[in-house]
Amino acid sequence: MKWLVFGIIFIIYNYIILCQDIVFPDDEELSHVGGNSGVITERIPISSPSECPENMLLFPGYGTTCVCDCRPRFLYFPTNDSCHEAYMQGPCPLNYYVVLPKNEAVPRCVENPCLTDGVVQYNGVCYPLRTIGGPCGPEGVLGVNETTFELECVPANVAPFLIIDAPKRRCPAGTRRNSLGICRDII
């Protein structure tokens, strides 16, 4: 009988204590917090899976309430209660993208002159977003300002969502790379 009670307590302990989701905020979720002074000037999001709709984060509200709000660089569409990334197609028709016009509070769909999702017009020429080079030179990335939602060059070392394409390391025919990165003959 005591083994049965011990087993039940052990299962409950593992289920309640050890199986809780622990989520740490990533750089994207904190990129809008603070500034050069190091003082927090904005609310810090609470990362809680499945509490908010897609592309939204949970923020502390007044008292004990919490509020879902858009991620940085995402715009809120009140018509369908959703957030979509600026200068991407989002809920817009084909060859259109989401923008926030100057001095307006509601985003809208505008025709994309480059006709490709993720490619935007900057200084009269079409460039892909979040890629090194282009109009920003070898040290910059074309991105969206989190406050004004306008296109700007961002230093590559601070650009969020920058994916580095590492060169492929291939093994000669008849060999396979092991966990140490060494090409070995297939046995």
Image: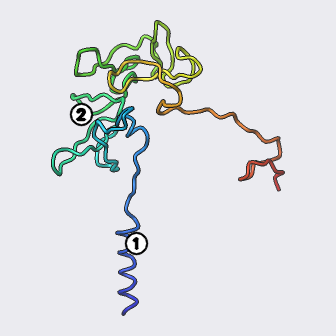
Quick check: 106 above or below 157?
A: above
| Amino acid at pointer 1 | Asn
Residue under circle 1? 14
Residue under circle 2? 81
Residue in view at x 39 percent, y 19 percent: 94
Does dot 2 land on a helix, a strand or a loop?
Answer: loop
* Image x and y of residue 127, in percent: 51, 16
Viewer-side residue, 171 vs 186: 171
Tag 1: Cα neighbours inside 10 Å, few (<14), some, or many (≥20)? few
Q: Report the quarter where the N terminus lies.
A: bottom left
* Image x and y of residue 67, in percent: 22, 43
Q: Report the quarter where the C terminus lies.
A: bottom right
* Image x and y of residue 91, in percent: 33, 26
Q: Which mark is first along the chain, 1 or 2?
A: 1
Viewer-side residue, 79 vs 105: 105
Residue in view at x 76 percent, y 39 percent: 170
